[in-house]
């Protein structure tokens, strides 16, 4: 078995994020949790995942603080998975992936749903990257620079 590279502690925030959410099953589980699924069997039935893969993914998502477990709402012996604030913070990532697919998919007419504003029923606007002053930015308008090093205070 090939050992997967770990990006924990990597200096790149994209690599660090992928350490927690870096496979497509994880993002699909998050999508379904955002749509209201909460039980192992619901995820397994909806996604058609092998139980062992689902179990590993759910455990990892709990360890990374994306999901939390809670007693089943119906009082049964089962438990449910709930998105944490960290998990709900992935919503813009799912929207960005959705909008990318809507724009670049070879057959966008096959996409079954449209993301709409719940109150108005209108499609949501495309996500935009903006500067602090509100200017619209593209990749060409951005660059990376080193974060200033914080000096640790010495104990006196």
Image (tube, helix red, strand yellow):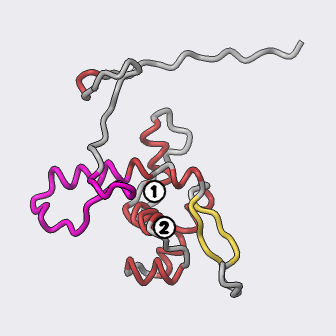
Contact between marks 2 and 1 (CB within 8 A): the answer is no
Residue pictured at 28% horizontal, 44% vertical: 125
Q: Which is nearer the N-term, disc 2 or disc 1?
A: 1
Q: Residues within 10 Å of mark 2 (few under 14, many from 20)?
A: many
Which stretch did the figure color magenta? Answer: 94-123
Q: Position of residue 97 (x, y in %)?
A: 30, 52
Q: Position of residue 10 (x, y in %)?
A: 51, 37
139 in relation to 57, above or below: above
Is 103 left, or right, of 137 in this rendering? left
Distance in Å between CA atoms under marks 2 and 1: 26 Å
Reading the image, the residue beneath label 2 is 33
Q: Where is residue 76 in the image (x, y as percent from the top left)?
A: 69, 87
Residue located farthest toward the front when viewing the structure as drawn: 120
Residue located farthest toward the right when viewing the structure as drawn: 156
Is 126 left, or right, of 109 in this rendering? right
58 in relation to 147, above or below: below
Reading the image, the residue beneath label 1 is 4
Residue located farthest toward the bottom when viewing the structure as drawn: 76
- Circle count: 2
Task: State the residue in front, 40 or 13.
Answer: 40
Residue pictured at 89% horizontal, 12% vertical: 156
Which of labels 2 and 1 is toward the front?
2
Q: Quadrant of residue 46?
A: bottom left
Residue 108 within the segment the image draws in magenta: yes
Q: How crowded is mark 1: few (under 14 residues within 10 Å), some or many (20 or more)?
A: few
Residue 63 within the segment the image draws in magenta: no
Task: State the residue in front, 123 or 131.
Answer: 123
Residue pictured at 25% horizontal, 66% vertical: 113
Label 1, secondary structure: give it: loop
């Amino acid at each position: 078995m090939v050992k997967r590279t770990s990006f924990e502690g990597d200096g790149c925030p994209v690599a660090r994020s992928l350490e927690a959410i870096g496979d497509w099953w994880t993002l699909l589980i998050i999508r379904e949790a955002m749509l209201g699924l909460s039980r192992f069997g619901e995820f397994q039935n909806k996604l058609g995942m092998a139980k062992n893969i689902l179990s590993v993914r759910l455990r990892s998502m709990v360890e990374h603080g994306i999901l939390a477990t809670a007693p089943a709402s119906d009082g049964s012996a089962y438990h449910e998975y709930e998105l944490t604030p960290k998990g709900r913070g992935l919503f813009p990532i799912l929207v960005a992936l959705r909008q990318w697919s809507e724009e670049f998919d070879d057959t966008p007419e096959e996409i079954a749903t449209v993301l709409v504003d719940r109150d108005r029923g209108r499609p949501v606007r495309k996500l935009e990257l903006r500067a602090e002053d509100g200017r619209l930015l593209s990749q060409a308008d951005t660059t990376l620079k080193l974060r200033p090093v914080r000096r640790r205070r010495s104990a006196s």
